[in-house]
Amino acid sequence: MGSRAAAAVMCHIEPDDGDDFVCGLICISYPLHHPKQQNKLRDENLFRIKEPVLFVSGSADEMCEKNLLEKVAQKMQAPNKIYWIEKANHSMAVKGRSTNDVFKEINTQILFWIQKITEMDKK
């Protein structure tokens, strides 16, 4: 499922419904806007999410300008974290780095974040 579709589903999950099946959302390369259309943000669902959100985005993503995502994240009611992959585009490709190396970095951050939110749930 893409990040945007997953965010739409998360809008319907209530943290207090007693179901611990979903305890957060991971958005890899969230498509905040179409390329060169930064004035038409696709952020409406993000503001309705209540569970923790991790964004993993490339600092050179043509569909998610860094300063725009940071502004959206500040306005969200859900706890959130943004992890930037330096020089990565929307496909997470980074000139001079192997795909394996980039994915290893992404996986490490995702695992740290999952560990953190599951520890928070236990408290």
Image (cartoon, helix red, strand yellow):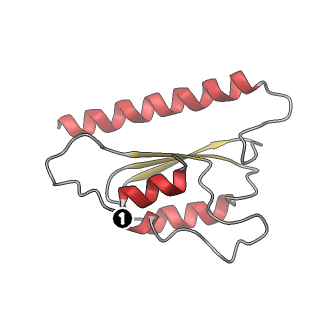
Residues 21 and 26: in front is 21
Q: Quadrant of the C terminus?
A: top left
The location of residue 17, given as percent across then percent down, is 16, 54
Residue at the limit of the structure toward the left, as seen here? 18
Q: Image check: 94 left or right of 121? A: right
Viewer-proximal residue among 117 and 20: 20
Position of 97 relative to 41 (above/below): above
The three-letter amino acid code for the residue at tag 1 is: Gln
Q: Residue at x 48, y 71 (%)?
A: 44
Percent coordinates x, y for residue 69 in the rendering: 59, 61
Q: How many numbered marks, from 0 up? A: 1
Residue 53 lies, in percent from the top left, at 42, 50
Q: Find disc 1 in the rendering and name its residue.
A: 77
The correct choice, above or below, for 113 with respect to 71 in the image is above
Looking at the image, residue 23 lies above or below residue 45 = above
Give the residue furthest to the right: 96
Query: Secondary structure beneath disc 1?
Result: loop
The quadrant where residue 24 appears: top left
Q: Is residue 123 above or below residue 15?
A: above
